[in-house]
Each structure stands twice: as structure tokens, then as C-alpha cells.
Amino acid sequence: MTLPRLGTLEPLPAADRPELLAPPVAAALASWDHAASLAVTAIDAALADTAAFGEAYDVPPEASANCVLVAGRRDGEERVAACIVRADTRADVNSVVRRLLEVRKCSFLPMERAVEESGMEHGGITPLGLPARWRVLVDARAVEIGTAVIGSGVRRSKLLLPGSLLALLPGAEVVTDLAR
């Protein structure tokens, strides 16, 4: 496997570095057919947020994909989704996501709840290893990223993978214009 290179990041095979992954991410990688195509790179946890990360490691925003967790209710049933969008866009939560979840109102999952239920750190939440009952909505533009940088479940590292693999995440639904 040729590890993807981007900016000044130093990628290593993700499967060989489970200490750089949140436990649910490491567990998901252990059973995902495409795990060998993922790399992980250690970063300064203080620089995990997209803008600071990109500037510090020479990674353009269009190479990063963010994962935001949203929820809405219908008929007493809560519907949760992870939305994966390029970092230079924003998930269209109030229109596209709301319609896809078939709810009247959709909002971001509170940070404390997102961290607790995902088993991941705030600022590192990633679509790999999320609870199976949550939908995984992937913006079509994120799938087109050559080498995509996503969270690893912890703030101290990032995953690198071909953007096309975002469409192959367990439960992934590729959505045109999920983001604006």
C-alpha cells in the first residue's frame, strides 16, 4: 500500500497504530475491508480544529472532511445522522439534512452527548466507528477528494484516506449537495 501524502503530515498505516485512534475507530478498522488503505498521522491536539490544522500542516481546507452529528425527532422517534462534508463547505442541516431525516426540525447534537455516545473526543469525531443505528450522510464533493483528511476519534491524530472510500463507509449514503 502506498500511503497518501499531504502537506507536512507523516502518515503511517492506521492498522499499525491503534494508540492514535479512539477505541471505536480502532474496532471498526479491525473489521473494515478497506482498512489497509487508511493512514494515520500524529498531530498537536491543540491544532485539531480545521483552520488551525490546515495552517500548521499545510493542508488546504478542500482536502479535509468534517463530520458533524445532527438529530431530529418525528413521531417521538429520534433520528441521528453523521454528515461528512468538505471543510470548505457547511452541511445544509436546515434544509437537505432535515428532509433526508424526515423531521420538522434538525439540530446539532450537543457536544457532551456526541462525545459520550460516539466514544470519541470533541474535535476528533469521525464517521468510522459510530453507532450502527446512526445514518452516515456523505456529501458527494467529499467523495471526490483525492486524499481526504478526517478525524481519528481523538484530537491528537488524523486519518488520511482516498476520498472515494468515504462512499464505502459502513452505512454510507452519498448525497448530492448535502453541503453548501
Image (cartoon, rainbow, N blue to C red):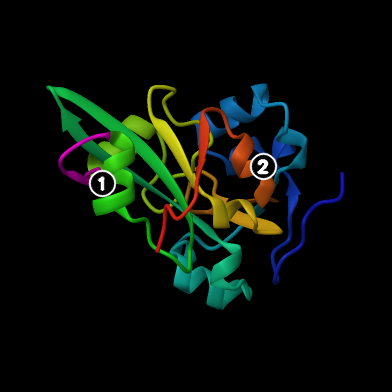
Measured as percent of width and height from the top left, residue 104 is found at 15, 40
Q: Is residue 79 visible?
A: yes
Horizontal side of residue 90 vs 128, given as left or right: left
Residue at mark 2: 165
168 relative to 137 in the view: left or right: right
Q: Residue furthest right?
A: 1
One can see residue 157 in this view:
no
Q: Is residue 92 magenta?
A: no
Depicted 113 relative to depicted 66: above or below: above
Q: What is the spatial separation of the Cα atoms under label 1 and label 2, in whole angstroms?
A: 27 Å
In the image: residue 41, left or right of residue 156: right
Q: Residue furthest left?
A: 76
- Name the side, left or right, on which 67 lies relative to 65: left
The one nearer the camera, 144 or 113, is 144
* Residue at 47%, 73% in the rendered image: 52
Picture disc at residue 111: 1
Q: Amino acid at mark 1?
A: Met
Q: Which residues are the magenta region?
A: 102-110
- How many dots with numbers? 2
Q: SS of the residue at dot 2?
A: helix
Tell me if mark 1 has few (under 14), some (14-19) or many (20+) residues whose alpha carbon lies within 10 angstroms of its own. few
Residue 105 highlighted magenta (yes or no): yes
Q: Considering the numbered disc 1 on the image, is that residue within a helix, a strand or a loop?
A: helix
Amino acid identity at mark 2: Leu
User: How far across and how far down the image is residue 102, in percent?
Assistant: 25, 34
- Classified by dominant secondary structure, the portion drawn in magenta counts as loop
Residue 138, image x, y percentages: 50, 45
- Please, is residue 141 above or below residue 161 in the view? below
